[in-house]
Each structure stands twice: as C-alpha cells, then as structure tokens.
Image (cartoon, rainbow, N blue to C red):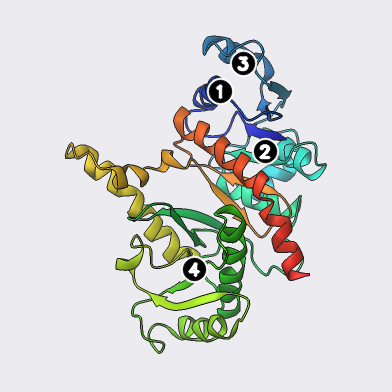
Amino acid sequence: MKIAIDAMGGDFAPDAIVEGVAMAAKSGLPEGVTLVLIGNQPVIEALLAKYETPANSPITVFHADEVIGMGEHPTKALSQKPNSSIGIGFKLLKEKQVQAFCSAGNTGAMHVGALFSVKAIEGVMRPCIAGFVPQLAGGYAVMLDIGANADCKPEVLAQFGELGSIYAQYTFQLDSPRVALMNIGEEEQKGSLVAQAAHQLLKENRRINFIGNIEGKDMFTNKADVIVTDGFTGNALFKLGESFYNVARTRDIQDDFIAKTNYESVGGSPIVGVNGNVIIAHGISSALAIKNMINLAIRQVESDAYTKIAQALS
C-alpha cells in the first residue's frame, strides 16, 4: 500500500507536513505501507533529517517542480501546472502507482483534480466531501456533503444517502447504517421543497436504512450513522462543531468528547463518489493532523469503500 502526501500543500507546508509524516513513521506504520512525499525533494529530505525520521522508514520522495497556491483558480492551476505536487499526486493515483492521495492544499484543486483524473464513479451524479461527526456515546457519524456541492437537487441528496450508507458500512463495519436527513424538524412534511422531495426519495429507497429527519440538536446524539445534507448546510454545521474545541480551550475546559471535535483528531475528509481514495485536510493542518490524516487514508484503502460503491451502482 502506497499513500501519497502533498508535501507542499497547506498553510504550514512543507514543515508541518513532513513533521506529520515523520510522526507517523515513528509511531509505526502497518506492515507493507509506504508513504510517498511529493514536492521539492531537497527541501523534503532536509526536513526529514530535521525531524529525525528513522533511516529505515518506509518513506520515498517524488520530486515536483511546482506548487498550486491556496488562492489559485483550481482548473487553471491544474492545467497550467501539471508538474505541481497536486498534479503529480493525481497522476500517480490515476496510474495506480499509489492507492491514496492526501493534501492540505488548495481544496478546489483537489476536488477538480479528482473529477478530471480518477473521475466520478459511473452513476454518481455529484461526488461529495464527507466529514466525521463525533458521537456522545462514542464513534463517529459520517456527514455528506460538507462543502463540495452548495446547492443540491433532491435526487442528489438522496444519492448522498446511498453513498454514505455504503461508505459507513465498509469503513465503520456496520451491517445496516442508519441514514438520516438533516432538516428543520422531524416531521416528514417539514423543510424546504428540496428537503421534502429528498425525504420521499430516501424513504422509497429500499437499499438503505432511512430513519427520517433529524435536527441540528441531534447531530452528536447517536441518532444516525449517516447524516445527509447539502454542502452549504453541512459545511456550516461541521465548522460550528469544530469550533467547540477552540471555545473549550479558551475556557480551559477538558472534555473527551469536545477533544474529538478538534479537526486534528481525524485529520481529513474523503471525497466520496470518485474512482480512488482522495483525502482533503484543513489548510491549517498541524503535524498531528497530518499524522491522523495518514491513518485515515490507510483505513480507507483497507475498507475498499470506493470499489464497493462502484459495484453497488453498476
């Protein structure tokens, strides 16, 4: 298994990225896992030495001449900078030289790169970004979309329910994941016209375990394993949840559940619905976040969720 990491993407790259890779290597990687760092080779090698990466660590470096900046236009940047760390990462993923590609760089470039390289799974209307929502009784629910598709038609939301169900089944080892629609009330007739129509489509889908609507207050209470919403609402809710950790820290509050709302605890979000394993991390990612992003990527490759989605939709 080879996990590719964009060493040049992120607000604190390449230092935080390489430090996170070094942390992952020191903590012990599963047998057979190799980490492929993509970026400026001399800089990366100097940082690996700085962070005292063990000489026998399963880490290789793939040189990239260019970097896509955080503020660059995604499509233009990918076409104008094919030798960027993101461009090369997707080339390696498309050619199956690596089994996953991760970056804390330009989110738009990561999403566009996934769509134009490994492409959407046949039958998927809109690939989406999934977020992991901690639950009070333990574990996580997967929420999708959390930012890729701000406006969604009912049939897109309904498909998110199916994509999330398959993803949760193989990633969390759940026989029948509970799928819920985020809404402004539990009643079937509540919400916008889009939400009402999506509810009916989810309700009619016999391939999923749809439990109905949930409200914002239910997000952390173990009511659902899969939370369906559009990217605008999902992004707002997800970032609100992430803010709890910073608020608690300013008040010197220590709590195990609130610690899980810290973005570093999972480290990244997968793009669900494409033909490959693509993980997007926060631009502000620290070394710890990168270490956990690598662990997430390994689990995702092991789950083989994207091929299970392709099989289900074929």
Task: Please give the name of the residue rendered at 51% of the width and 31% of the height, measured from the top-left corner.
Answer: 291
For marks 3 and 2, give the CA distance.
17 Å
Tag 4: residue type? Asp
Is residue 142 or residue 130 the one in the foreground? 142
Q: Work out whether residue 148 can be spotted.
A: yes
Give the side of residue 255 with respect to residue 171, left or right: left
Quadrant position of the C terminus in the picture = bottom right
Q: Which callout, 4 or 3, points to the residue nearer the camera?
A: 4
Task: Please give the name of the residue rendered at 64% of the width and 66% of the height, measured from the top-left corner.
Answer: 126
Marks counted in the figure total: 4
Which mark is first along the chain, 3 or 1? 1
- Where is residue 93, by image quadrant? top right
Q: Which callout, 1 or 3, points to the residue nearer the camera?
A: 1
Q: Which residue is mark 3?
A: 43
Asked if marks 4 and 2 touch (Cβ < 8 Å), the reply is no
Where residue 281 appears, as percent x and y from the top left, is: 52, 42
Give the side of residue 99 with respect to residue 203, left or right: right
